[in-house]
């Protein structure tokens, strides 16, 4: 039995009482959008918040990384929203990520034109068949995912990087996240190899993929965000396996759990067009890296060529204090699983702060001169958010290591009793038993021989 951790959470997480995940540190337009979506669609605020952060991170992609002095951190984060069925988990995710799907559709339309031109050429004159780029992953194989990630760092015929593709991020969007893991387990023994790739994707490590047709892909600095939802009862079946409990996969996810849900009455209000449009323009701005002003001027958001964002003196001091607090928590952790939660938070807080920083730069529409500096206030807000995710990670651990509810006793039939009698008293006479309970010897014989 795994070590138990006592979880004490104060407050009430509900649609009316507000969320424990703060949003006060986000830019005003993002807060307005999150609050409007929650008000119109009656969904927990933290679910909308993490969908917004994952969407923004994917739009930024590999254009910036956070340099804390020793390590360069891409803005890759994996979020899971957990609540019981009927809590409106999936639609907010679909709504908030819609700007990414629009960009994805544009990429497909461009590919379709190129592919049609390629197909229209005589077979002998054709080059390699064009491949379709993407930024959204849904139902696709590991091989297709690797191809998409590879195209984001692919070079052209002259050996130069396509700056647009090389900066592109990818996101996996998974309503009912368990389906993603089930798909990975389908064709391999236990899914160990695909899960190992997932671990490396979170760490943004270079991945070399050898294909059966002889073509080898070197995926450099892969960027793959994940956003998914899960019913509360599926936490243990999804994340409770021995593999996930020991290989660090669980701790790479940031969980939002809402257990006390209020269900407001139906409302006829609609999301204001200007608020929805502002969100779409923010994501487009982050994807393009450029603000196109109405007066015809274009302002680049991130002008430093290496894409590095460094911590201000105040932000660095806050991060150092938080890092050292987590080091002490690791030292006192009752087991490796809990210690790993704190290790991952040391990375996740930097990535979270980087996403908030990017949203701040977009809010200022390219007018921020210190776009390469992450401010103290941004780090302080991100640390407060990590306090929430720490509590959720410990709550997940408690839920997946709790003793399962005992199954209701199986109803015992007369036939079960007869077979049990023969098991316990193998020398009993079938004819005599039939006489004692008032049935035919043929029935006793039939029941006794049934498996």
Image (cartoon, rainbow, N blue to C red):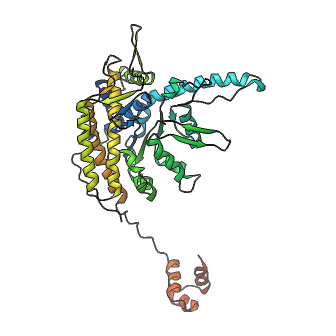
Q: Position of residue 172 (x, y in %)?
A: 48, 38
Q: Position of residue 418 (x, y in %)?
A: 52, 82
Of residues 63 and 104, which is closer to you in this image? 63
Q: Position of residue 333 (x, y in %)?
A: 28, 56
Of residues 278 and 436, which is closer to you in this image? 278
What residue lies at 44% left-to-right and 59% top-to-bottom? Answer: 242
Picture mark count: 0
Decide if residue 445 is on the left or right side of residue 424: right
> Is residue 265 at least partly visible in the picture?
no
Residue 320, relative to residue 162: is it above or below?
A: below
In the rendered view of the protein, which quadrant contains the N terminus? bottom left
Q: Quadrant of residue 91?
A: top left
In the rendered view of the protein, which quadrant contains the C terminus? bottom right
Of residues 26 and 165, which is closer to you in this image? 165
Residue 445, relative to residue 248: is it above or below?
A: below
Decide if residue 382 is on the left or right side of residue 280: left
Residue 195, relative to residue 159: is it above or below?
A: below
What residue lies at 45% left-to-right and 27% top-to-bottom? Answer: 99
Decide if residue 185 is on the left or right side of residue 260: right
> Is residue 396 at least partly visible in the picture?
yes
Q: Residue furthest front?
A: 70
Q: Position of residue 258 (x, y in %)?
A: 32, 45
Q: Residue furthest top?
A: 295
Residue 209, relative to residue 134: is it above or below?
A: below
What residue lies at 53% left-to-right and 86% top-to-bottom? Answer: 422
Q: Quadrant of residue 64?
A: top left
Of residues 314 and 92, which is closer to you in this image? 314
């Amino acid at each position: 039995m795994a070590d138990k951790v006592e979880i004490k959470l104060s407050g009430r997480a509900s649609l009316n009482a507000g969320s424990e995940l703060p949003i006060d540190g986000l830019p005003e337009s993002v807060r307005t959008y999150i609050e409007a979506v929650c008000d119109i669609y009656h969904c927990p605020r933290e679910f909308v918040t993490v969908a917004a952060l994952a969407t923004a991170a994917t739009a930024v992609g590999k254009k910036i990384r956070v340099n804390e002095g020793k390590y360069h951190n891409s803005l890759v984060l994996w979020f899971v929203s957990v609540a019981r069925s009927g809590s409106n988990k999936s639609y907010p995710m679909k709504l908030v990520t819609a700007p990414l799907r629009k960009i994805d559709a544009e990429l497909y339309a461009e590919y379709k034109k190129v592919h049609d031109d390629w197909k229209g050429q005589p077979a002998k004159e054709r080059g390699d068949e064009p491949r379709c780029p993407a930024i959204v992953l849904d139902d696709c194989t590991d091989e297709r995912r690797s191809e998409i990630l590879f195209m984001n760092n692919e070079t052209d015929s002259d050996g130069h990087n396509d700056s647009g593709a090389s900066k592109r991020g990818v996101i996996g969007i998974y309503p009912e996240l368990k389906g993603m893991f089930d798909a990975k387990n389908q064709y391999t023994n236990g899914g160990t190899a695909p899960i190992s790739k997932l671990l490396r994707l979170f760490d943004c490590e270079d991945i070399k993929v050898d294909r059966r047709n002889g073509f080898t892909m070197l995926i450099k600095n892969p960027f793959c965000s994940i956003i998914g939802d899960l019913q509360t009862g599926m936490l243990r079946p999804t994340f409770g396996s021995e593999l996930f409990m020991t290989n660090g996969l669980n701790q790479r996810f940031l969980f939002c759990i809402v257990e006390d849900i209020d269900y407001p009455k139906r409302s006829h209000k609609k999301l204001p067009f200007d608020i929805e449009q502002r969100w779409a323009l923010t994501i487009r701005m982050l994807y393009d890296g450029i603000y196109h002003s109405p007066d015809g001027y274009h302002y680049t958001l991130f002008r430093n060529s290496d894409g590095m964002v460094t911590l201000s003196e105040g932000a660095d001091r806050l991060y150092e204090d938080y890092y050292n607090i987590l080091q002490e928590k690791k030292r006192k952790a009752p087991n490796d699983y809990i210690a790993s939660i704190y290790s991952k938070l040391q990375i996740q807080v930097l990535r979270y702060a980087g996403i908030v920083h990017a949203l701040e730069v977009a809010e200022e529409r390219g007018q921020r001169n210190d776009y390469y500096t992450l401010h103290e206030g941004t780090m302080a807000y991100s640390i407060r958010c990590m306090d929430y995710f720490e509590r959720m990670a410990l709550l997940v651990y408690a839920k997946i290591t709790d003793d399962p509810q005992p199954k209701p006793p199986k109803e015992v039939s007369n036939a079960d009793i007869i077979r049990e009698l023969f098991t316990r008293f193998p020398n009993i006479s079938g004819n005599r038993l039939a006489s004692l309970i008032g049935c035919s010897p043929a029935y006793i014989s039939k029941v006794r021989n049934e498996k």
